[in-house]
Amino acid sequence: MNSKYIAIFALAAGLVGGSLFMAQAQSDVKPAASDAKAAVPDPRIDKLLEQNAQILKNQDEILKDLADLKEGVLQARRRSS
């Protein structure tokens, strides 16, 4: 009976100690925005944003071309039947 209480107490103490350790570890991490390097804009991010915009533009053009192609296929089906 006493060993059950000792085991429960040890488990509770471990959980409390672990949670305190995790809380301390999380509070030690500093956000990247406070870093001095974060204040300087990264040209790689600008390049990625430009590439993303170009991809979206190309995607719109491809979707328009596909819509035109679909319309052409439908007209060809109508004429052949």
Image: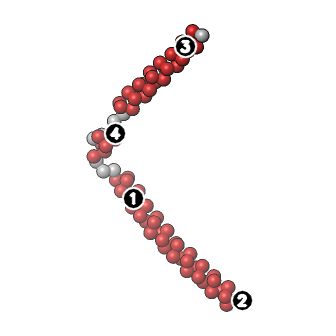
Cα–Cα gap, marks 3 and 4: 42 Å
Q: Earlier in the sequence, mark 3 or mark 4?
A: 3
x 34%, y 39%: residue = 31
Indicate whether 29 appears above or below 18. Answer: below
Looking at the image, which residue sits at the far front?
1
Q: Earlier in the sequence, mark 2 or mark 4?
A: 4
x 40%, y 29%: residue = 23
Q: Which residue is mark 4?
A: 31
Q: Position of residue 50 (x, y in %)?
A: 39, 61
Indicate whether 52 appears above or below 18. Answer: below
Q: Which residue is mark 1?
A: 49
Disc 2 marks which amino acid? Ser
Q: Which residue is mark 2?
A: 81
Disc 3 marks which amino acid? Tyr
Disc 1 marks which amino acid? Leu
Q: Is residue 78 left or right of residue 2?
A: right
Query: Of helix, strand and loop, which one carries label 1?
Result: helix
Q: Which color scheme does this rendered protein use?
A: secondary structure
